[in-house]
Amino acid sequence: MSILLISTLMLSYFLLLLVVSRLVSGKENSNEAYFTGNHRAPWMAVAYGMIGTLLSGVTFMSVPGYVRQSQFTYLGVVAGNFIGFLIIAFILIPLYYRLHLTSIYSYLGERFGARTQTTGAFLFMLSRLIGSALRLYIVVFILYEFAFKESGLPFWVLAAIILFLILLYTFRGGIKTVVWTDVLQTTCMLLAIAGILYLLKTGLGSTFFAAFKKAGEAGKMRIYDSDWRSATFFWKQLASGICLTITMTGLDQDMMQKNLSCRNARESQKNMSITATLFVLINVLFLGLGILLLAYADNNHIVLPQKSDAIFSTIALSAGSVTSILFMIGLVAAGYSSADGTIAALTTTFCVDVIGFEKRKDLSEEKKIRLRKMMHVIFTTCFFIIIVGFRPFHSDALISTIFMIAGYTYGPLLALFCFGMLLKNRRVYDKAVPFIAVISPVASYLINRYSKELLFGYTFGFEILLLNALLAFVGLCIFSRKKD
């Protein structure tokens, strides 16, 4: 594909997002609209738009490529995701609405104290900043490698352009805008995938059933891994999927901010239930796409790259101009949807949990708006630094990298919420929480590094999150006392 065509596609897509954001936000510039969308977002729009955020550019690129090395074992994680979504819908969402929260980490402040609230907020900001920046990184990486590299355009310039475009359409409206731009982006992503599937099927010259039957006979559709020492052991994958969903969605301000923009808890629960169902179906679709990509490569004698993340792009960009255009549309949609809501959520968390907007009577509304806009720009800049800085360390499968990072950063957050809801008669020493939040990830990392020697050959996968949360939970129990 030519640089001119890709640039035209990106610019056209951005202009469409900008039009949608202007229609939604209008001239409204209030913090209430930015933080909560005035609690007027239709639950169906939130549910549908969240799919694009949950999938992101990493799912778009990594899950189809993941099939080559791990077959369908990722379905264990997806099944756990579904259970986790239901736990969020019927346990966490009623709690958040009952407390009328703007930031979900305000719960930690009410339950434990100011230091715990700030610790929870920083854990989220660190986790989400790294995770979402890496999700956007894969989009920038693919665009650069397959389109802009030959032109001599530096990698950092492309990253800066993409982030600047995201900044323009999220700067004013925040979550009120993001809810509706996510609807557009999810639609573009799904239409692109549907078109690519059809074109691949046509190129194979056979039916989907025939391709899957052949893959099954070749052992490429294995779901259940019975080796308890393996990182893809089914029950480890299931447990990890549950905990990853609870933490990366239910305890994540980015995801919950969209849910809290619904009119009430019941509508938010409907949103989460629909999201859970669609999420499972679409992940199955992406895994099926992986099978078709491998079959297409075999039939057309395409040499696949060593990196799993590059399999989809290599095949899509060599399968004809229409497939290439659809791929780029889906990729850009996935990348934008993973970043816009996160920047708004990070800004909200910093303003509410760190600066304390709701308690600061010394700040006028105009000054709060200026501070909010400044933080929005700062977090966008942080995205840029991480994307550019990560490039020399690009690993094979980014989805595994992101989940492992989440396992270390979200573990203490999971422990805090579990302790707060399960042990209501105990109170943690507020000053001890920041130290526990540092010690438990470090201890988890050391155990993971030497697990083969210590645990008879056992290797940790995504379930490192469970170990981390358990260690943090024990620490919270030690540094706690009964309520007076």
Image (spheres, helix red, strand yellow):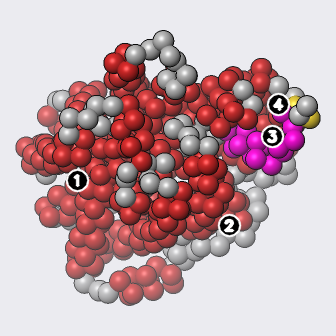
Looking at the rendered structure, the kind of residue marked 3 is Phe
Disc 3 designates what residue? 473
**Splitting the image into 4 quarters, where does residue 371 fall?**
top left
Q: Give the spatial CA distance, label 4 vs label 2.
A: 35 Å
**Gap between marks 4 and 3, in whole Å?**
11 Å
Query: Considering only order in the chain, which callout, 4 or 1, is on the residue closer to the N terminus?
Result: 1
Q: Position of residue 157 (x, y in %)?
A: 23, 27
Q: Which element is circle 3 on?
A: helix
Badge nearest the viewer, 4 or 3: 4
Question: For the residues marked 1 and 4, what is the alpha-carbon distance in whole angstroms?
Answer: 50 Å
Between circles 2 and 3, the one closer to the viewer is: 3
Magenta span of residues: 413-428
Residue type at the position of mark 4: Val
Q: Residues within 10 Å of mark 1 (few under 14, many from 20)?
A: many
Kind of element beneath mark 2: helix
Which residue in the structure is indicated by mark 4?
Answer: 428
Q: Which mark is residue 234?
A: 2
Precedes in sequence: disc 1 or disc 2: 2
Provide the secondary structure element on which disc 1 rests: helix
| Image point (49%, 65%), residue name | 270
**Residue 458 is inside the magenta segment:** no
Q: Position of residue 456 (x, y in %)?
A: 85, 51
Mark pair 1, 2: CA separation: 34 Å
Q: CA distance from mark 1 to mark 3?
A: 44 Å
Question: Which sits earlier in the primary sequence, circle 4 or circle 2?
Answer: 2
